[in-house]
Every structure is written in structure tokens, then in C-alpha cells.
Amino acid sequence: MAKDPAVLINVALCAVITLRLMFFRKPGARHSWWASWLAYLLILAYGSIPIKFAFSEYSGTHIETLIVNLAMLALVIRARGNAAKLFSRKI
């Protein structure tokens, strides 16, 4: 396992992003195919990091990656996990 704090922080950020997107539920909302695919792709991308870490395949990260992932986490939390609102101006 990696002892680098940047790696651990990045894995935690990616795990929270993935879980928040996975458990989005809005009762009575209309289905949007493009938002579903966007959420699916984001879950695959961000979910791969904790999985790689669990199997000791992820060993390094950069500060730039941490900054981008922290900004993405802020967007996901602000949109309450709604992929359709992630890139909307009206969050």
C-alpha cells in the first residue's frame, strides 16, 4: 500500500465522487439519457482509482490531479450528485 498522503487523499476524493454519483436519486424526475451516460462514464473513471488502489495498481498522483479532483468533488456535492446539473450554469 502507498504511504504517500497525496495518493490517499486522491483515492478518498475519487471514492466520494463515485459514491455520490452512484447514489443520486430524484423521485419523480424525468430520465435524461445523456445525463445517465455522463454519470456512468464519470463513475467508471473516478471509480477505477479506488479499485486500482485496492489491488495495489495505483501508486502515484500529482498535485494538479488533486486540485482538479477537489474541484470536481465540489461540483458533484453542489449538484447533489445530479450529473445533468454538473455543467449547468444554474447550480
Image: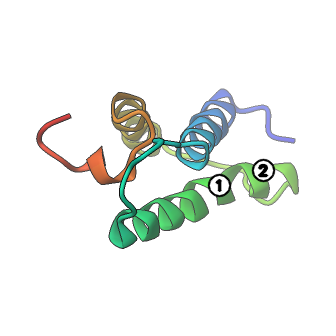
Query: Quick check: marks 1 and 2 in contact, CB under 8 Å?
Result: no
Local secondary structure at mark 1: helix
Residue drawn 44% across and 70% down? 37
Report the mark closest to the observer, 1 or 2: 1
Front position in the image: 3 or 87: 87
Residue named by callout 2: 53
Front position in the image: 60 or 71: 71
Residue drawn 57% across and 35% down? 13
- From what the image shows, is residue 7 above or below residue 5? below
Front position in the image: 35 or 43: 35
Query: Within the image, what quadrant is residue 33 found in?
Result: bottom left
Local secondary structure at mark 2: helix
Q: Tell me if 17 is positioned left or right of 37 in this view.
A: right
Residue drawn 45% across and 40% down? 81
Point out which mark residue 47 bears. 1
Q: The C terminus is located in which quarter? A: top left
Query: Which kind of residue does numbered mark 1 sit on?
Result: Gly
